[in-house]
Structures are given as structure tokens and as C-alpha cells.
Image (cartoon, rainbow, N blue to C red):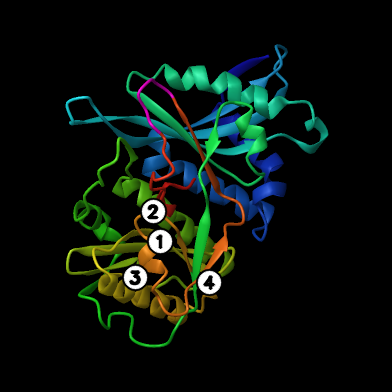
Amino acid sequence: MRLVLATDAQKTERDSFTYSAWGPPLTPPGYAAREQRLRAHPWAHAEMRTWLLCKEAGEVLASCETFRTRSFLRAEDGTRVAGDSFAIASVFTEERLRGRGYATQLMDLLLPELRLAPEAQAALLFSDVGPSIYRRSGYRELSAWNWALAPEPGEPGDLVDRLLGETELDKALARTHPPEQPFLLWPTAAQADWHLERERIYSKELGRPRPEACGATIGSSTALWAMVGKSGVLVLLWLDARTQEDASALLGAARRVAYRAGLSRVEVWEEPGTAPLLARIPGATREPRDGALPMLQPLRPGVLLSESLPIPRVLWV
């Protein structure tokens, strides 16, 4: 067996197989259009690769995607060294081929390929099938909790300095500063906009109105969010709240935006730095995350993957 990069034609052909896993509630043509648009997005066009596990004769046994993402490793002298990490997504084996270990073989062959990148630091994936299949390839999971908040009526801009539009992602992320971690995954504005592209697609395909803003600021604190159109939920992509009061104000704006967009709830991924803030938000409930279990593996010595590593929703693929 061998690992190969998919051609554009093979990517399109693969869409017809993966529809059963990730297509509904879109129609097959709608899902095909979604995949074409997501691959054409500037971030994905530059950083995404589709990999195929094939027999020597060429039959495809399993597939996945990788997205190069920005990360930082703290050197011995304390300086941050910028590098590349890789988010792995859409690991898929056709039903008729399952139970033969092809997904594990795919992951095992992929890691040496990722380590060839000169600045490789780590690999990240979000498992919807539990941790065991990826543990076999050396990945280790982090805990995964969600906080849920009900939408609430009111003017979204009340109690924050301003709401953010989708052209302001660069400025919004520039306001934030990386925490003191030995290793850190850090998104770009293009990566954040990829989530808004998903929002745009589902809004068009399902006739669902888009939220009127994609974030808010107050003082030196910032939040970014996006609608998950297939489930009707507003997710916090990024929450950088410097105080409890700022967290309450930013999440209040998100709740009011969700209410005016007719969404069912607001979801926030728990991070070590945000957990104490979320616990003090009236009405917020903590629950185990259903899927999207973060799992990581170093791609070079010296990368320390601790339980305190922040994994915001903006890193999900």
C-alpha cells in the first residue's frame, strides 16, 4: 500500500463517497458545491492537501485531509520559534472496506510525510469516533467540554464597545497575545474566515439568515463567532476575555446575535483559561463534548503537549 496526494478529479470523486458521513442536511449536489467552495477558499487553497491510501493497483482504501496551521515552540532561550503544525480532518473509509485497519495504516503512513516539513512541530485532529483508533498511531487526547448558553433578546451591541464584521478578522486577532505556553497553536485571520465561509455556504444552501456580526470587542478583550448552519448553533471561535466583566459582555453580545438570527443556542469550547470565566456566567451549563475530541502528536522532539494547551474552536477542521 502507498500514500498519494489526490488530484482535483480524485477529490471530486471522493466527495460522492463522503457525502453519507458529512453531507446531510445538504443534498448531494449541495454538498459537492460546499466541498468545491471550501477547497477554493484562500486558506484551504494554500494549506490543504487530500491524501489517499491506495493499493499498488490504485484502488483507494481510505482518505483524509491535512491543513497546515501556524504554531509556536518556545526555545531554550525563551524565544518563540514559529513553525508548522498540521490539522487532520475527514478521515474516511468506505463502509465496505471498514474493519481492516486501513484508517490506522493511513495515519501511520501520513506522519512521516508531515515530519518532512522543515518546520514541522505537531499534528492535531478532532475525533468523532473516540480516542482508541488514533491512540494506535501515537495520538493523545485532551479533555473536551462545552459550555452552552441560551440566546437572549436585546440589542447585540449593548454593553460592548463594538460589533465586528467579517472584514475585521486581522485586526481582531492582532489585539490578542499568545499565552505563555511551551507549545502553542495560533490561528490566522484566513483560518478564521474559513469558518465564516462554511457559514456563508450553509446560509445559501439552507436559506438560513446569517448572524449580523461575527464578533465583538470590549476594552482589550475580543470574541469571534460563527454560525454552524447545519445545526442552527452559534459557536465561539475565539474568546480572549481579560476580565469576568468582559467575558459576560462578549458572551451577552453573542447570545443576542444568536437570538436575532433564530439560532437555538450558543456553544463555547472550554479552555484552561476560559473555564473559570464560563463557570460564573449565569445560565451557562457545562457538558461533555459530543465528538470533536482534540488529539495531538509531536512531530519533532521538544514539543510538549500538556493538558493546559488551549484548543479554541477556530482550530477545528
Q: Report which residue position mark 1 lands on.
A: 275
Q: How far apart are marks 1 and 2 (CA)?
A: 6 Å
Q: Give the label on residue 95, or none.
A: none
Q: Nearer the viewer, residue 308 or 240?
A: 308
- At horizontal 37% and vertical 64% (from top left) the residue drawn is 276
Q: Report which residue position mark 3 lands on.
A: 213
Tell me the kind of residue under disc 3. Answer: Ala
Secondary structure found at label 1: helix
Q: Which of marks 3 and 1 is nearer the N terminus?
A: 3
Q: Distance between the residues labelled 2 and 4?
A: 33 Å
Is there a contact, CB below 8 Å, between mark 1 and mark 2? yes
Q: Report which residue position mark 2 lands on.
A: 272
Q: Nearer the viewer, mark 3 or mark 4?
A: 3
Residues rendered magenta in the picture = 299-304
Q: Which of marks 2 and 3 is in front?
A: 2
Tell me the kind of residue under disc 2. Answer: Pro
Is there a contact, CB below 8 Å, between mark 2 and mark 3? no
Q: Give the label on residue 208, or none.
A: 4
Number of other residues with Cα within 10 Å of mark 4, as a class: few under 14, some 14 to 19, many 20 or more: some
- Magenta stretch holds residue 149: no
Q: In which quarter of the image is residue 72?
A: top left
Tell me the kind of residue under disc 4. Answer: Arg
Q: Which of marks 1 and 4 is nearer the N terminus?
A: 4
